[in-house]
Every structure is written in C-alpha cells, then in structure tokens.
Image: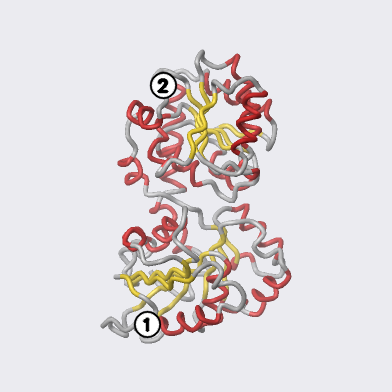
Amino acid sequence: MAGGPEGAGQRGHSPAQPWVLQFCHGYDGPFLDCARQYARLFAGTPYRVATVYLTGEPSSEAELGSASDEVIFLGHSSREVRGLKLAAIRELRRILRGRDFRLCIAHRFKPAYVALLAGSLPVIAVHHAFDDYRRLSRRLFAACFRRRLSLLGVSDSVRDDMRACLPAWPAERIETLYNRIDVQALQATQPDRRTARQALGLPEGAWIVGNVGRLHPDKDQATLLRGFAEALPRLPAGSLLAILGSGRLEAELKALAGTLGIDRQVRFLGQIPEARRYFRAFDVFALSSDHEPFGMVLLEAMAAGVPLIATDCGGGREVVEGVGRLFPLGDAAALAAALAQLAGLDESARDACVQAMARRLEERFSDRAVARRFWALPMIAPFLAN
C-alpha cells in the first residue's frame, strides 16, 4: 500500500513482525529499479520491506515497481531537502514508531544522512556514484556514525573510491554489491530484431551500432562518433550508428558528425521511453562513458544478446571484461578497431559471445547471484539472520 508519513507504521501490522526500511531519494530514472532490486533481496525471508521515497509525488507505477510490502511517499521537492532536512527527519521518526525495524538500507547520501539522524537503526548506505565522500563534511559526518554505518558501492570501482576517502575504515564495512536485473522479465519485454528496428525507424538490413545515454560530456559520444567514422571503411556497407538520448550536447554532436562526414550514417533518435526494450535492434552496443560507476545499459544489452564495447575504466570494465571488448577512454582508434573486430564475427563466434554474456548475467548480475552475495556480507550478519 502507499501512504504519507502521518500514521505510517500503524496499519495493523504485528509489532513482532521484523521489518527492513528502504529509504530512497526518489524513483526517477534507474532508481525505481534499484528499489526493486533491494526489496527482492528479502523475498522468502521473515522480513517485510517498507520503501520510503524522500522526493516524488505518490505514483501507482512507483508503488508497483518497488516490489515492497509498503510504499510511502514523503513528497518533498529537491529544494526542500537541502540543508538540515528537519521535516524529513521528523517524518521518518514517525514511520519508525510501532514496528520492529532491524535495518535501514539508504540509497545515496541524503537518505543516509536523514536515516542516521532520525533514529538508532544500523544503516547500510548504497552509493551509486563516485566522489560521495570527497567532501570533508561528509567524511566527518560518516565518522560520527561509524559504529552503525556501513557502505556499499555498486561496483568495485565505487567501493575503492570510498575506501580511498575513508582509509581508517575496516574493509568489511565498505563493500560491493552489484546492480542487477531480472533477466527473464526484461527479455519478455524486448521485441525481436525486426520489430525493434521498426519501432526505432531503423532499416532492417543495416549493421547497426547502438548507444543509449544522455548527450553529456560524461558519456563521451564525441569519441564514439570519431571511432565510428574511422571504422566505417572496415564495417559492412550501409552501417549506421544509432544514438538514443537527449542532452545539452545534441547540437555539438550533430555538428561533429557533419564535420566527420558521417551525418548520413548517424541517427540521433532522441529520448526513447523504455529504450532498453529495443536493444535487439543493434548488432553491437557501444558505451564510451568517462568512468561510469556501473552501467546498467550494459546489462540490458547483454540480456538482449548484443555484443559489447565499453571503455576500460570505472564499473563498466567489471561488467564487460571477459565477455566483450574494452578500449582506453577517449581512444577513438582503439574503439574503431573493436568495432571492426565485432563486425567480423562469424555466426559461431557471435553465438559463443551471446552464451558468455548469458553466463555472466546469471553468475554475477542476476537477482539470485546478488542475493547470495548480500546474505554473505559480514556487515549483514550482526543485524539480520536469513
């Protein structure tokens, strides 16, 4: 059920029922699925999950997508949760009353801040980006609550960044728990290649490189354009680059495509709702990002059976290494070589690549694999028993 903070925690639940509080900044972008991922960790256990969203109005879609026993929307705006966040602290205290909460899982720094000040629960803060503890004020805050605060990074790269910022913390209090996907559920929403291409307005017979992401310096589509232009003579005739996304660099990137003489071979398709449904339209998926913390789009491409190219840095390396091609950040020539290699795969080699990606998903990035990892974490044992 959904509800506001008033009266939350007093809905007739048995006081002896053990609960886990999941506290999220919001449900925009990928964060709704993050809530689902963590709620699913407790499926089949004695624990019920209450998911609270700090920002965002009540939404039936968010309520359903959270996969939780109860969903509560505090409804604050981003402006309202700047500064001390006293209203949010008071509201969370009301939610904590009347139930046997054992643990709080907080996504991003602000929810962790509010949760630590609102009660006495142990808090596991899940961090989805680099540099969250570069600020001295945040390091001092974390040190104040070190006895009941543990940290998870969505990749080893994010984990290592936090360990470098907090060198006095024991390693077992700063760990990795990968993002993951419900592979079967996602695949059920992905139409076949022909239908996906029709939906995106792409020609059925072309060899297509796909990219999905904001048109932003962090995504470095400029290197992707240069690499594609350099590779074109070695790619099948009629090859295209399809870029799904919008952002402030759109005009600049279109101008670069013109300068490179590939404006007719590049399709800027804009923001596509539920873009992950259409990944089967691509022959290759290329991610040129600058230090991606994880790269959920890589998992989505793997689920679609699309060979991968990604920059050899950040969390993307951990997803792709061993099952796809990696190239140095900003190296257009190396990206062009990787594109040419994948264009040359015969059917047998492509099938082997698809099978390797499927194994990687199941062994490392499935709900089942990550649940096993979660329950084995040393930071979990003191608070929860599976």
In the foreground, 218 or 265: 265
Q: Provide residue 11's location: percent of width, then percent of height.
A: 28, 81
Q: Provide residue 195's location: percent of width, then percent of height.
A: 32, 29
In the foreground, 53 or 156: 53
Q: Answer yes or no: do the residues labelled 1 and 2 have beta carbons within 8 Å?
A: no
Please rate how many residues cluster around mark 2, counting C-alpha atoms within 10 Å: few if below 14, some from 14 to 19, many from 20.
Answer: some
Which quadrant, please, contains the N terminus?
Answer: bottom left
Please rate how many residues cluster around mark 1, counting C-alpha atoms within 10 Å: few if below 14, some from 14 to 19, many from 20.
Answer: few
Residue that badge 1 annotates: 6
Q: Residue at x 35, y 78 (%)?
A: 18
- The earlier-in-sequence mark between 1 and 2 is 1
- Is 47 located above or below residue 8 in the figure? above
Residue that badge 2 annotates: 203
Residue 118 located left or right of residue 43: right
Amino acid on which the number 1 mark rests in the picture? Glu
- Is 371 located above or below residue 1 in the figure? above
- Is 69 located above or below residue 218 in the figure? below
Q: Residue at x 44, y 60 (%)?
A: 27
